[in-house]
Image: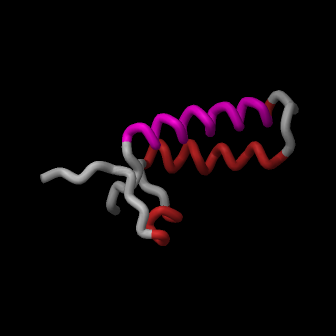
Amino acid sequence: MNINVGMIDKVVRIIVGLILIALTLMGTIGVWGWLGVILLATGLMGRCPLYAMLGVNTCPTHK
């Protein structure tokens, strides 16, 4: 399992995911807020299947 999500991308995904989940639980936004679970999971795992399909990699390469 290759990591394809960089550190800044991870932090943004985790923060936005938590915000969306919190707004959904408070009833501020509808069920679309549960998409925050996907952002949170991909941020914590460091791997995004959509990035893999598109060939995107925000993780810096090590030489």
x and y percentages locating residue 43 in the rendered image: 48, 44
**Residue 10 shown in magenta:** yes
Q: Which colour scheme is used?
A: secondary structure
Q: Which residue appears at 45% of the width and 41% of the height?
A: 10
Residue 21 occupies which quadrant of the picture? top right
Q: Is residue 63 left or right of residue 48?
A: left
The residue lying at 71 percent from left, 37 percent from top is 20
Magenta span includes 53: no
Q: Which quarter of the rendered picture does the N terminus lie within? A: bottom left
| Pick the front one: 38 or 60 | 60
Residue 31 located left or right of residue 48: right
x, y percent for residue 48: 48, 57
Q: Which residue is drawn at 62% across and 39% down?
A: 17
Where residue 40 sits in the image (x, y, percent)? Answer: 56, 42
Residue drawn at point x = 46 percent, y = 43 percent: 9
- Say whether residue 39 is left or right of residue 52: right
Judge left or right: residue 53 versus residue 28: left
Tally of numbered tags: 0
Horizontal and vertical percent position of residue 22? 72, 30
Give the vertical position of 8 relative to 38 (above or below).
above
Q: Is residue 24 above or below residue 4?
A: above
Q: Main secondary structure of the magenta part?
A: helix
Q: For the view shown, which residue lies furthest in the left direction?
A: 63
Q: Give the range drawn in magenta.
A: 7-24
